[in-house]
Amino acid sequence: HLHFVPIVDAGISLLDSNVGENWYDIGKGMDVFIKSTKFPLEKDGNILGIQWPGLTAYLDVFSELAYAIWNFGLNVLFGYMPFDGIWLSMDEPTNFCVDSTGKPIGECYKAPTATKTEATVATESNTSKKPPSPVQAGEFDDIPFLPDGEPLDSNTLSMDAYFTDNNDNKTFVMYNLHNLYATLLMNVTYRYMTAENMSKMRHFMISRGSFVGHGRFGTVYTSENKATFEDLSLSMHQVMAFNMFGIPFVGSDI
């Protein structure tokens, strides 16, 4: 038996698709993306990063419509090529934005390789119906302790990015929810894979990021490593650690 498990990245591309739907336009119309505190008037207030396709937006997993668009997208993918599981990646969420000096930054609006489509999106006004950010821009940029001395938004999104919260108390911001994001996205994917139309499948769901309780919805792989004895040793420690965390099926890159 052969089984097909596509890798689905967390970022939703701004580029027009040559085939099928424009997922950024659909998500923008549904207002289901994480919002920017620093640039609320740019790109409908959606925070943008860079992943493999270029500029990308990120699903607000707390939006009431998050499951609807994720379900729609996976249904379309299944129509193109029936799959047996989902492999979530870049779901920390990852962001490759850098400034003019090459230093990683938490969001980007002037990508050096921006296409005409992306540049057009950048001039749009904010039509989002979400309330303004509950925190100040840069509120978490200068905290007393930084792991390894690196900014918290290095290779990920700004810590002041915010999610949907109808009773806001400053909790639903990336600073508090970053570690949860991958597991919450896995939860949305789990709901799709366990829906009635997919219930006959033996569910295979794997993710690069995880948090407490992740094993209820899916499993984990330990991400990229190098061909060194140090990384080989680390990968074995990681696999055994996840076994103790209640996730028995874990793998590492080779």
Image (spheres, rainbow, N blue to C red):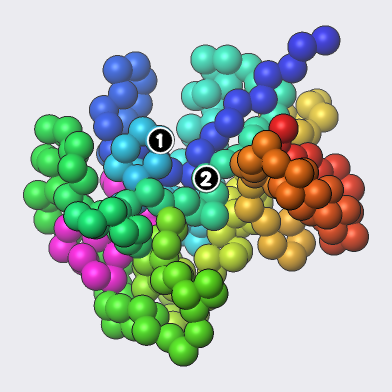
Label 2: how many residues lie within 10 Å, few (<14), some (14-19) or many (20+)?
Answer: many
Check residue 42 for magenta coloring. Answer: yes
Picture quarter with the C terminus? top right
Rendered residue at 30%/65% (across/down): 36
Relative vertical location of residue 115 with respect to residue 124 in this rendering, above or below: above
Residue 57: image x %, image y %?
Answer: 35, 48
Secondary element under disc 1, as helix, strand or loop, is loop
Residue at 54 percent across and 17 percent down: it is 79
Mark 1 lies on residue: 52
Q: Are marks 2 and 1 in contact (CB under 8 Å)?
A: yes
Principal SS element in the magenta part?
loop
User: Looking at this rendering, what residue extends furthest in the front direction?
Assistant: 229
| Dot 1 amino acid type | Trp
Q: Residue furthest top?
A: 1
Report x, y in % for residue 24: 32, 40
The part of the chain drawn in magenta is: 27-46
Q: Residues within 10 Å of mark 1 (few under 14, many from 20)?
A: few
Please, is residue 87 above or below residue 82 in the view?
A: below
Q: Amino acid at mark 2?
A: Met
Residue on which the image places disc 2? 90
Between discs 2 and 1, the one toward the N terminus:
1
Toward the viewer: 237 or 61? 237
Q: Nearer the viewer, residue 190 or 183?
A: 183
Identify the image quadrant of residue 55. Answer: top left
The vertical placement of 188 against 166, above or below, is: above
